Amino acid sequence: TCAEQMTILTGMANKSIYDFSVETLDGQPVPLSNYRGKVLLIINVYHRMNTLMEMFGDLNFTVLGFPSNQFGLQSPVNHETLNVLKYVRPGGGFVPKFPVFGRIEVNGLNEEPLFAYLKESLPFVNPVIGDMKKFYWSPIKVNDIRWNFEKFLITADGMPFKRYELHCPIENVEKDIAELL
């Protein structure tokens, strides 16, 4: 089974993801309160995510994509993101059926405040750090996202619910989304 972590809300009871804003690929600010009332899956990898949108997109659910270049320097600059998704990774003409935001840092000194909040709310799920030669941030901390396949599931009222480690089967994520809906 995959390691999962349920929300522990100590000292953060008055915070939700609606307290944060993020930027689109072209630099426009978007308050996450725009997604109030939806179950959200926050990701920075795109494989199988359109399938989740096809399964649950009509049911107050959406995926939110956040590219990060901190894992093996694999993420392009913002203006190249959609073309790289379409032609390279995952490729094959892939067009996301969900919002993809501007490239961010999810770990280290310049981590996006949203991800600092998510990691504080849902501590690490994978005790293995991984190949640190492929990590591009400092300092490395125990709650850091280990690789870009980790996911965060958010309830319809904006509360972090579960964090999934990179090897967690997508079927586990699907089951939890269905339960929240």
Image (cartoon, helix red, strand yellow):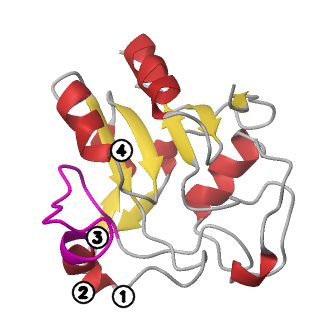
Residue 28 appears left or right of 68: left
Name the residue located 43 percent from the left edge and 79 percent from the top edge.
75
Determine which residue is flagged by label 4: 33
Q: Does the magenta-highlighted stretch encompass residue 67? A: no
Q: In this rendering, would 112 be left or right of 64?
A: right
CB within 8 Å, label 3 to label 2 = no
Q: Closer to us: mark 3 or mark 2?
A: 2
Question: What kind of residue is marked 4?
Answer: Ser
Identified by mark 2, the residue type is His
Q: Are marks 4 and 1 in contact (CB under 8 Å)?
A: no
Element assignment for label 1: loop
Quadrant in which residue 137 is drawn: bottom right
Q: Which residue is mark 3?
A: 24
Q: Is residue 139 above or below residue 35?
A: below
Q: CA distance from mark 4 to mark 1?
A: 26 Å
On the image, the x and y values in percent for residue 126 come to: 78, 46
Residue 125 location (% of width, % of height): 76, 41
- In reply to whether residue 87 is colored magenta, the answer given is yes
> Looking at the image, which is closer to me, 44 or 48?
48
Q: Which residue is mark 2?
A: 79
Q: CA distance from mark 2 to mark 1?
A: 6 Å
Q: Quadrant of residue 140?
A: bottom right
Q: Which region of the structure is painted magenta? A: 85-101
Magenta stretch secondary structure, dominant: loop
Q: In the rendered structure, are the residues bearing label 1 and label 3 in contact, judged by CB atoms less than 8 Å apart? A: no
Nearest to the eye among marks 3 and 4: give it.
3
Quarter of the figure with the C terminus: top left
